[in-house]
Image (tube, rainbow, N blue to C red):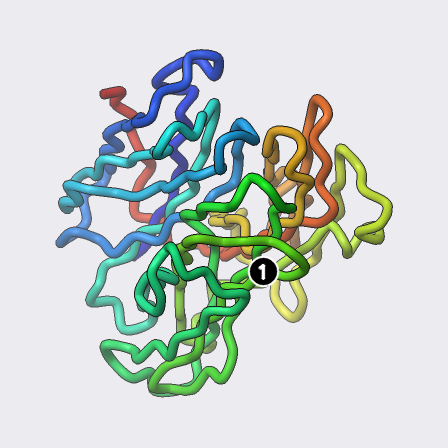
Amino acid sequence: MACNGAFDTRAVRPWNQPRPQTSQVIQFSTPFECPPSLALGLSVLDIQNVPDPRVTVYATDVTDTSASFHANSEEGSTLYTATTNWFGVDPRDPDFQIGEFSTTQVHPRNKPQVLTSCRITFARPFVEVPKVISVLREFHFSKDHGWRITTEVSHINCNGFTIHIKSWADTIIYSATASWIAYSPSIGDVYSGSVNTMDAHAWTQPKAQTSKAVEFQGMTFTKVPNVFFGLYSLDMSSDRNLRIKCTMDNVGRKGFTWHIDTWANSVIWSAGISYLCFERLVGKAILRPR
């Protein structure tokens, strides 16, 4: 059993009334049998470029019927808007495992690294080598350099995998956190992958709006699937606000169209999202502002 949804700060407050902490209770219309494991991924952001841009999204008070979702900034960072997509699954589901990794598990914030990696061990070994995706749910950049970050996974086997969070050029990442989802490849109603603006144009030719159609390779869903997605990669100019909006439409049994956009004077050199499409829906979500 699994379900997904989204938390948007604009459902609680206007974008032009930023505050350090914004939260909303999301109640599942069909309860889980126990509190679900949750993965969160950022999909929409509007953050002032000074001081250091910082954002974190997370869930608390997770029960079998609801969870409280939060989008926070820290130490003077101004968060105008944030949207996080979430994916929930019964933690006892033998086909799925969910977790997260923070760079602070390896080094403190005041000792940033270009590359931070960690070996993840599954709580339960998979029978066959699983597929794994990772998405960003938190980051803290230096305001003085371009904002560049990516999370990826490697060396996957039945017992675990290695997760990486890295930057390049002169970027300084004080901290970042990625959520990950692993699932059995033999499941017939799940499909995952990643897309990037560089699939549509070179990073040296930035555009305010980028989109492209994706066709599922080797499978067709029996009905229109649900889609969870979040940012896995970002490369933006730091002399303007960090504004990015990732959406999907035209979702059908054979594919979908993705969009990665910005607005005003912000510049996206490149950005990428990882996605998970699935049919096994538990229930929709009911939003309750807090």
From the viewer's perspective, is residue 65 above or below residue 169?
above
Label 1 CA crowd tier, 10 Å (few <14, some 14–19, many 20+) = many
Q: Position of residue 275 (x, y in %)?
A: 54, 55
Q: Position of residue 181 (x, y in %)?
A: 40, 64
Q: Is residue 220 left or right of residue 100?
A: right
Between residues 277 and 261, which one lies in front from this camera angle? 261
| Residue at position x 77%, y 56% in the image | 199
| Residue at position x 46%, y 82% in the image | 156
From the viewer's perspective, is residue 3 above or below residue 219?
above
| Residue at position x 47%, y 47% in the image | 226
| Residue at position x 40%, y 63% in the image | 180
Q: Position of residue 136 (x, y in %)?
A: 46, 52
Between residues 216 and 56, which one lies in front from this camera angle? 56
Which quadrant would residue 219 be assigned to in this image?
A: bottom right
Which quadrant would residue 127 be assigned to in this image?
A: bottom left
Q: Report the residue marked by disc 1.
A: 167
Q: Amino acid at mark 1?
A: Ser
Q: Quadrant of the N terminus?
A: bottom left
From the viewer's perspective, is residue 85 above or below residue 16?
below
Q: Position of residue 182 (x, y in %)?
A: 40, 69
Q: Is residue 220 left or right of residue 57?
A: right
From the viewer's perspective, is residue 130 above or below residue 228?
below
Between residues 90 and 43, which one lies in front from this camera angle? 43
Which quadrant would residue 170 be assigned to in this image?
A: bottom right
Q: Quadrant of the C terminus?
A: top left
